[in-house]
């Protein structure tokens, strides 16, 4: 199975480019974002142009299909038993009134 570079759907600040690169490299997205900011400060127009180009070139990660909803299976009901009904509470003793 080949790995593909996608823009992230979950780890995104602007367009998901840095998050997608981080997912591809299996590293923290913050590291990629900090590296981009450093590159942007050092190579002012090039890093910005590269980011914009990647935002248009990189496809967005396809949505994963959700598992279809399956209602719980109906519970089986047992047939009423022919046992005797539960015993009634003990009768109260008459109180002696004087």
Image: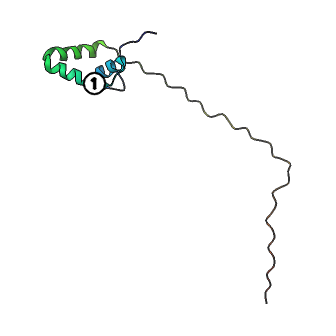
Viewport quadrant of the C terminus: bottom right
Residue 50 position, x and y percent, is 21, 14
Classify mark 1: residues with Cα within 10 Å, few (<14), some (14-19) or many (20+): few
Residue 56 position, x and y percent, is 27, 14
Look at the numbered disc 1 and give the secondary structure of its residue.
helix
Of 68 and 53, nearer the camera is 53
Residue at x-position 83% and y-position 47%:
81
Residue 82 in the image: above or below residue 65: below
Residue at x-position 49% and y-position 25%:
66
Residue 1 position, x and y percent, is 46, 10
In which quarter of the view is residue 2 placed? top left
Residue 57 position, x and y percent, is 29, 12
> Total number of numbered labels?
1
Residue at x-position 81% and y-position 79%:
94
From this viewpoint, which residue is outermost toward the bottom?
98
In which quarter of the view is residue 75 placed? top right
Of 58 and 30, nearer the camera is 30
Of 2 and 67, nearer the camera is 2
Residue 2 in the image: above or below residue 15: above
Instruction: Give the residue pinned by disc 1.
Output: 31
Type of colouring: rainbow
Residue 95 in the image: above or below residue 47: below
Residue at x-position 81% and y-position 46%:
80
Of 7 and 77, nearer the camera is 7
């Amino acid at each position: 199975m080949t790995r593909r570079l996608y823009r992230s759907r979950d780890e995104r600040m602007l367009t998901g480019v840095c998050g997608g690169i981080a997912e591809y490299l299996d590293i923290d997205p913050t590291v990629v974002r900090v590296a981009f900011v450093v590159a942007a400060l050092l190579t002012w127009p090039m890093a910005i142009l590269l980011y914009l180009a990647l935002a248009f070139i990189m496809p967005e990660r396809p949505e994963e299909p959700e598992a279809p909803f399956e209602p719980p299976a109906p519970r089986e009901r047992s047939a009423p038993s022919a046992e005797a009904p539960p015993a009634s509470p003990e009768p109260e003793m008459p109180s002696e009134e004087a």
